Amino acid sequence: MSITLPEFLEPYDHQLPGEPSTQPVKYRAALFRHKRIPSTAHAFWWPAQTGSNGQTCFVFVPGNPGLLDWYTPFLAALYEKSQGRLNILAHALVGHTPNLQSCHENISATTLSAQVEHLLEVVDAVKDRYDHVVLAGHSVGSWIALQALKQRNQSINAIFLLFPTISGIADTPNAHRLSPLFKAPIPRIVAWLSPLTRLIPDRIFAWMYSDWPEAQRAVLKSLTTSPSTVYAALSMAHEEMRDIKSLDGDLLLRHKHRLHLYFAEQDDWVGKNKDAIIKVFCDEPDAIKIVHGRQDIPHAFCISE
């Protein structure tokens, strides 16, 4: 199946870890060359099928670590569910793609604020070509998507926030446990040591992550053996703890009719912030679309069965 990319993307020879080269796919790996903050991002593109209206583009922003390979089953299922009526553009966080060396050359391009600028550039490029732009973000990708909505509200028709970490991340149970890992000089030390994970036999790695699908374990292995990717993910996590604090309730209310939120029943990256977010809409409960997930759907849904 030949897939034509829109003009803002260029082809990228990329195969999913653990994916058979003979397996037919309905998407294409690509690169988005950023000019405002020079860097390169990994992308996946699912084109709307011929005969559909095809004027809506669904733009997906991952969480941290921002590797797209983890999300491919989810995005492929979404494409099938839409019966091919959507164009889907998944855009990795810059600096979070192993083996894509060009995106590691500019450290300033991998900061949290830079990820917002990258998304703004993506939204502008997509809006120039398609009539309707829908954003979706997972975890910190939700916060990044909201910052884009704040600056491009005329360009974005709807926004989906999945397991949203949009306030008080440092005060969540997982942050209390893991935040020391994100503070200097630990990210550099961990990144420097990360190639040693190559020495772990595959059978031991499989035992350590026995509840993960095999393909997702392969993605994890590619991450842990890439020092630049490890450093980018850990250092950006420190920025998240430091910078994502107060809930922007005014922003949520101002755009309430465009918002769709999905919360896990138990989410240690959101914690009590879930109640604070819902409380923003307590006077207008019918104006917002909120779904509460089942107990067995975790925050890291993209690496579960």
Image (cartoon, helix red, strand yellow):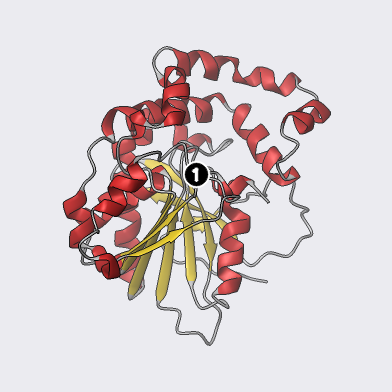
User: Of helix, strand and loop, which one carries label 1?
Assistant: loop
Residue located farthest toward the right when viewing the structure as drawn: 203
Q: Quadrant of residue 131?
A: bottom left
- Give the residue displayed 75% in from the left and 19% down from the top: 199
On the question of residue 98 being in view, the answer is yes
- Give the residue displayed 58% in from the left and 78% down from the top: 83
- Give the residue displayed 60% in from the left and 20% down from the top: 194
Of the pair 295 and 92, the residue shown nearer to us: 295
- 299 sits to left or right of 209: left
Q: Which residue is mark 1?
A: 266
* Total labels drawn: 1
Of the pair 280 and 71, the residue shown nearer to us: 280
Q: Quadrant of residue 122?
A: bottom left
As shown in the figure, which amino acid type bears the numbered disc 1? Answer: Gln
Of the pair 165 and 91, the residue shown nearer to us: 165
Of the pair 213 and 220, the residue shown nearer to us: 213
On the question of residue 9 being in view, the answer is no
Q: Is residue 168 above or below residue 130?
A: above
Q: Position of residue 169 (x, y in %)?
A: 35, 34
Q: Position of residue 148 (x, y in %)?
A: 27, 53
- 63 sits to left or right of 296: left
Residue located farthest toward the bottom when viewing the structure as drawn: 51
Q: Quadrant of residue 197?
A: top right
In the rendered image, the quadrant that contains the N terminus is bottom right
Q: Position of residue 11 (x, y in %)?
A: 55, 56
Q: Is residue 18 above or below residue 133?
A: above
Q: Position of residue 175 (x, y in %)?
A: 42, 27
